[in-house]
Amino acid sequence: AIPQSDDTSSTPTAPINTLIVRVAKSEGLAPEDLEILSMAETTWNDTSLGCPQPDMVYAQILVSGWLIRLQDAAGNEYEIHTGKDMEPFIVCDTGTTIIRPLPDRPPQSNPAVDAAIRWLAENKNISSETVLVKSIESVQWPDSCLGCPQTKETCLMVVTPGYRIVLLSEDQTYELYTDEIGRNVRHCTTLDGTPSVKE
């Protein structure tokens, strides 16, 4: 990342206050327990916002954003990486990157996430109650097959907005590809190496 400024005077008050509320909620804290240690405008080298996950692929484009350090009442520090308008934001303090959507609603209310959880429950014989959302990444898939074609499947070569969703259940991690509304859900790492598809 390329730090540009540590001057918070030009920072919009509403977005940073909203961000603190969301970070506090995600970490089980009260907003008043968090104070800003530092914040700087930054240009991230890619869409991982400086917090890449293993085995994940990110668009290699410069992304304007913020690097923010917060501290709670117990002295624990939290490093927050955000996009230009502080959306999305990533909590990087624990070594595990968790991409959290900014809207004040649980990730499960996203129809694509709902569809991914249903796919996992139906195809892996897993109770949906045990499924946790580890990360959600917005992706522009290169084709209608979400970059995961089946044998002899014909894919339309059109950019398809969607998500790469990582789910966790009983210590097992599952990476699912979806379109924007969850009509197309794909799991590209089945045991036999054959992509699974649910239209």
Image: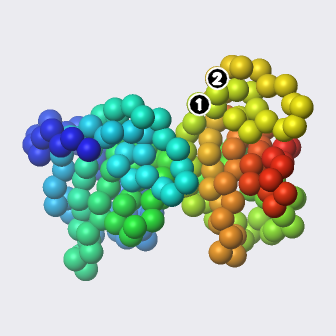
- Tell me the amino acid under the disc marked 2: Val
Q: Quadrant of residue 11?
A: top left
Where 19 sits versus 182, above or below?
A: below
Would residue 18 be visible to someone looking at this image? no
Q: Dot 2 lies on which element? A: loop
Q: Identify the image quadrant of the N terminus.
A: top left
Give 28 or 133, whichever is nearer the viewer. 133
Q: Do the numbered discs 1 and 2 sit on residues whose CB atoms are within 8 Å?
A: yes
Q: Quadrant of residue 47?
A: top left
- Report x, y in % for residue 159: 64, 23
Image check: 93 left or right of 107? left
Distance (Cα) linking label 1 and label 2: 6 Å
User: Would you say 91 lies left or right of 179 here?
Assistant: left
Q: Which residue is mark 2?
A: 159
Q: Nearer the viewer, residue 60 or 94?
A: 60
Ranked by sequence position, the earlier of labels 1 and 2 is 1
Q: What kind of element bears circle 1?
A: strand
- Residue 140 disc label: 1
Three-letter code, disc 1: Gln
* Rendered residue at 62%/41% (across/down): 163
- Measured as percent of width and height from the top left, residue 48 is found at 42, 45
Q: Which is nearer the eye, 160 or 111?
A: 160
Work out whether 68 lies above or below 9. Answer: below
In the rendered view, does 175 fall on the left or right side of 2? right
